[in-house]
Image (tube, rainbow, N blue to C red):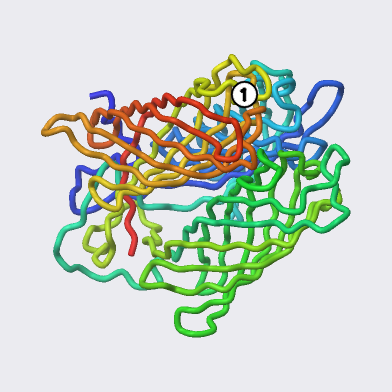
């Protein structure tokens, strides 16, 4: 069957072990040419997972870092073909398909669809992979069509992903020791920026005194105390809807009491939109946090910090509250892992969905321009199954058509999946809330909610097709839309404890 291609776990014929998956985090830099001779430094971040010896794919994001377009951000999927010439030299070619925009709206990004093609080479060293090549970035419905050299750095790692839904046997094997586990945290974040007097918007007006944001944060510990972090948040309160930030950082924690930790971290990344004056897009923050474990896995955290854009007047005191999940995953280095070595771990069932959504007008003033055009979006959804029928879900989508370039939304919530008797069909229902903004959609401060219901078809143990119909609204804005969603789901299993 077509949908049983060996994605990730190609050698699962050996039921006593699971194949590991080589992967990499890659950062790229393109100096993109815009109309009228303007330049934009574009930072890309991609997580690529090897499907086989010559093909990789994974999610990616790009954001303006240098120039005048802070807040120009896109989200999507990347794929790459590669060929090793020597032991430490590789040639590659790839493509990114995504959506987004900002700081130029539909005049610059059009509907928001972005295509990026590249050809290049990479030198593998003990510090990671260093690469260079030629890229072409195209917004087919906009005015950006640019060829340029690019530079890249990538950090390789190995992870354990089992294709489809896998369960561990009910017997006890050799317990994997703490030296073979990677400690991680995933949290939902509610943040507020308190902005002092004298800070101006990108149009020169006085910046509103608060921005409320909602998003997610992921921490990965390199040892018992040192960690790296990635966070992404969008405005959902205040008067800066459309503002978004993606930050990468490094931190250190100190244990105060059993289950109580103090954490210090600093991050930098790309940010902008919503009229916030972020210049070329670079933003820096420093944060102190107090974390309290609420049980074996759950934790609550509060933090305070300072955020600054180096090239503009924007600065703020940052306060945040977080609720998160603390867990360990196997820290693998070999090509296969015996199931006996996973005794003590739990199998976590995840579904990743590549999603297309269309917004249809459900209120007269739902958009500030092109109100009679539908809005088409592309993005990703991730579902974590707490039970065979219940899951937590999160999604990030961006507009690619409908003259709404720069519109993005990030939502979290819960869902229900019920099989229809003994058929491959299943029923779904979801309730989500989060942040949205940009593209002229009238979402007020940025807070939105969405409900979905639909029908799915399980093509195989790994793949499913899902169609949903829903409704989305902004409580403090005129935005109202009927939503049609079509997605391709991929089921896989992670192992944690």
**Quarter of the view holding residue 234:** top right
Quarter holding residue 139: top right
Q: Residue at x 37, y 46 (%)?
A: 414
| Residue 108 placement, left or right of 48 | right
Indicate the position of residue 265 as horizontal and vertical percent values.
65, 66
Does residue 209 lie above or below 84 as drawn? Answer: below
Task: Compare residues 346 and 275 and report the one nearer the observer.
Answer: 275
37 vs 79, nearest the viewer: 37
Disc 1 crowd rating (10 Å Cα; few below 14, some 14-19, many 20+) is some
Between residue 170 and residue 236, name the one nearer to us. 236
**Which residue is painted at 74% across and 20% down in the image?**
107
Dot 1: what SS?
loop
Identify the residue at image location x=64%, y=52%: 212
Residue 130 seen from this side: no
- Residue tagged 1: 365
Q: Determine whether, in the image, residue 261 is placed left or right of residue 276.
A: left
In the visual, does 330 lie left or right of 211? left
Quarter of the image where the C terminus is located: bottom left
Q: Can you see residue 397?
A: yes
Query: Residue 28 at x, y = what percent?
Result: 66, 40
Q: In this view, which residue lies farthest toward the bottom?
A: 257
Seen in the picture, residue 266 relative to 39 is either above or below; the reply is below
Residue 476 in the image: state x and y as whole percent: 60, 40
Total tally of numbered discs in the picture = 1
Residue found 32% across the figure and 44% down from its top: 492
319 with respect to 18 (left or right): right
* 65 vs 414, nearest the viewer: 414
């Amino acid at each position: 069957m077509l949908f049983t291609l060996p994605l990730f776990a190609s050698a699962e014929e050996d039921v006593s072990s699971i194949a590991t998956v080589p992967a990499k985090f890659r950062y790229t830099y393109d100096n993109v040419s815009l109309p009228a001779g303007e330049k934009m430094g574009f930072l890309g971040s991609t997580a690529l997972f090897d499907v086989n010896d010559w093909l990789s794919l994974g999610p990616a994001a790009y954001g303006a870092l240098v120039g005048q377009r802070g807040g120009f951000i896109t989200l999507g999927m990347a794929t790459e073909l590669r060929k090793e010439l020597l032991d430490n030299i590789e040639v590659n070619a790839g493509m990114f398909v995504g959506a987004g925009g900002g700081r130029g709206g539909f005049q610059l990004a059009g509907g928001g669809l972005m295509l990026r093609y590249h050809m290049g080479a990479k030198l593998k060293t003990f510090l990671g992979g260093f690469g260079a090549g030629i890229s072409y970035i195209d917004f087919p419905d906009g005015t950006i069509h640019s060829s340029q050299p690019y530079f890249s750095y990538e950090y390789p790692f190995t992870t354990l992903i089992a294709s489809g839904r896998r369960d561990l046997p009910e017997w006890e094997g050799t317990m994997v020791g703490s030296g073979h586990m990677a400690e991680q945290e995933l949290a939902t974040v509610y943040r507020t920026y308190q902005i002092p007097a004298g800070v101006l918007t990108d149009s020169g007006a006085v910046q509103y005194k608060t921005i409320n944001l909602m998003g997610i944060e992921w921490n990965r510990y390199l040892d018992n105390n040192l960690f790296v972090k990635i966070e992404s948040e969008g405005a959902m309160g205040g008067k800066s809807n459309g503002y978004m930030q993606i930050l990468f950082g490094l931190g250190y924690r100190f244990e105060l009491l059993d289950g109580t930790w103090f954490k210090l971290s600093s991050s930098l990344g790309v940010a902008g939109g919503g009229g916030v004056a972020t210049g070329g897009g670079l933003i820096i923050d420093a944060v102190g946090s107090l974390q309290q474990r609420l049980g074996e896995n759950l934790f609550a955290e509060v933090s305070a910090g300072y955020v600054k854009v180096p090239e503009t007047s924007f600065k703020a005191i940052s306060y945040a509250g977080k609720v998160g999940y603390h867990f360990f995953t196997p820290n693998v280095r070999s090509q296969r892992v015996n199931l006996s070595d996973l005794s003590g771990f739990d199998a976590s069932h995840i579904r990743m969905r590549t999603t297309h959504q269309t917004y249809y007008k459900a209120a007269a003033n739902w958009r500030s321009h092109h109100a009679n055009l539908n809005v088409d979006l592309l993005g990703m959804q991730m579902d974590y199954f707490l039970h065979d029928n219940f899951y937590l879900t999160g999604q990030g989508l961006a507009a690619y058509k409908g003259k709404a370039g720069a519109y993005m939304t990030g939502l979290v919530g819960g869902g229900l999946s019920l099989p229809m008797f003994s058929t491959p069909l299943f029923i779904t229902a979801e309730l989500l809330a989060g942040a949205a903004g940009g593209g002229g959609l009238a979402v007020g401060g940025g807070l939105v909610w969405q409900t979905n219901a639909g029908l799915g078809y399980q093509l195989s143990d790994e793949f499913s097709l899902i169609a949903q119909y829903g409704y989305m609204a902004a409580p403090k804005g005129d935005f109202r839309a009927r939503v049609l969603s079509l997605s391709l789901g991929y089921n896989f299993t992670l192992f944690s404890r």
